[in-house]
Image (cartoon, rainbow, N blue to C red):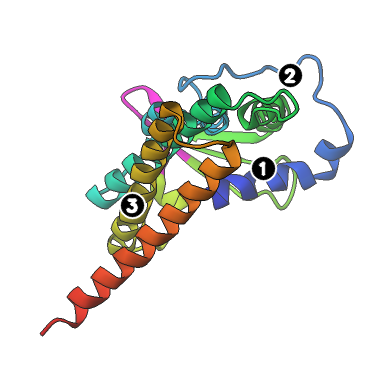
């Protein structure tokens, strides 16, 4: 998933001298990890990313048109498929020397949450703007819908046409189908090693992308 602006938002927070050199004051309030506040929604987003939690991403991301609804579903499906494949691989091929990538991502969350809590916030009606404290902070906008703060998808995919979003969603769903099939094959004992399974899934994704591109080209050039 493209989270360029979210990543940029956190990069600005991390780069700000006052935040990079000092810890948060002990009295600084910490927003709950839920959609009751803009900060809580950002935290919930990053937690969902760390846990490959597709349903929470559906709840947090806010579409403005049908194409954005489609890409949100694809993003959520990809996260769920990634979780299913990772779970299957770790269950079938346990390796205590290789940490679960989800655990590693979870370990980064407290620092991310602290930076979100340190951001400046301005709320006007049902629109919130968060940015890094001090000069140079890039504003990040959230919207409140039915009492819950959400991240407008057009913040993440600015200037991307609906046709391109639909195409991206289609490509993602091709990957999802293969990843879920791969998870089932791992559980069924098709592969001798985790490396074999991963290599096969990657090959299938590449092959499917080539076949889909060829089919689209033929359709576009058909008289």
Evaluate if marks 2 and 3 touch, with contact meaning CB atoms under 8 Å apart.
no
Read off the residue under disc 2.
28
In the rendered image, which quarter is residue 144 located in?
top left
Task: Kindly identify which numbered label has been placed on residue 104.
Answer: none
Instruction: Answer whether residue 77 is visible to the viewer in this image.
Output: no
The magenta stretch is: 142-152
Secondary structure, mark 2, is loop
- x and y percent of residue 138 in the render? 63, 50
Q: Residue furthest right?
A: 21
Q: Is residue 147 magenta?
A: yes
For the residue carrying disc 2, how many other residues have a C-alpha within 10 Å: few (<14), some (14-19), or many (20+)? few
The tag on residue 10 is 1
Residue at image coords 32%, 69%: 213
Q: Position of residue 54 (x, y in %)?
A: 41, 31
**Residue 114 visible within the image:** yes
Quadrant into which the C terminus falls: bottom left
Task: List the residue tagged with mark 3.
Answer: 169
Q: CA distance from mark 2 to mark 1?
A: 18 Å
Residue 190: percent from left, percent from top: 44, 35
The residue that appears at 85% across and 44% down in the rendered structure is 17
Image height of 165 relative to 126, above or below: below
* Image-based side of 211 in relation to 121, left or right: left
């Amino acid at each position: 998933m493209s989270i360029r602006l979210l990543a940029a938002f956190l990069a600005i927070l991390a780069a700000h001298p006052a935040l990079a050199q000092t810890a948060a004051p002990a009295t600084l309030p910490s927003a709950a990890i839920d959609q009751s506040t803009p900060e809580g929604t950002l935290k919930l987003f990053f937690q969902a990313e760390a846990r490959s939690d597709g349903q929470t991403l559906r709840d947090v991301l806010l579409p403005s048109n049908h194409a954005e609804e489609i890409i949100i579903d694809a993003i959520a499906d990809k996260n769920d498929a990634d979780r299913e494949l990772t779970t299957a691989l770790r269950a079938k091929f346990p390796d205590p020397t290789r940490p679960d990538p989800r655990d590693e991502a979870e370990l980064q969350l407290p620092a991310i949450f602290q930076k979100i809590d340190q951001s400046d916030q301005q709320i006007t009606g049902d629109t919130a703007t968060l940015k890094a404290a001090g000069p140079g902070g890039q504003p990040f906008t959230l919207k409140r819908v039915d009492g819950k703060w959400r991240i407008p998808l057009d913040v993440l995919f600015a200037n991307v046409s609906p046709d391109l979003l639909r195409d991206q969603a289609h490509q993602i769903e091709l990957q999802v189908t293969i990843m879920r099939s791969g998870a089932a094959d791992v559980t069924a004992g098709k592969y001798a090693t985790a490396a074999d399974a991963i290599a096969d899934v990657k090959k299938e994704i590449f092959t499917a992308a080539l076949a889909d591109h060829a089919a689209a080209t033929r359709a576009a050039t058909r008289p």
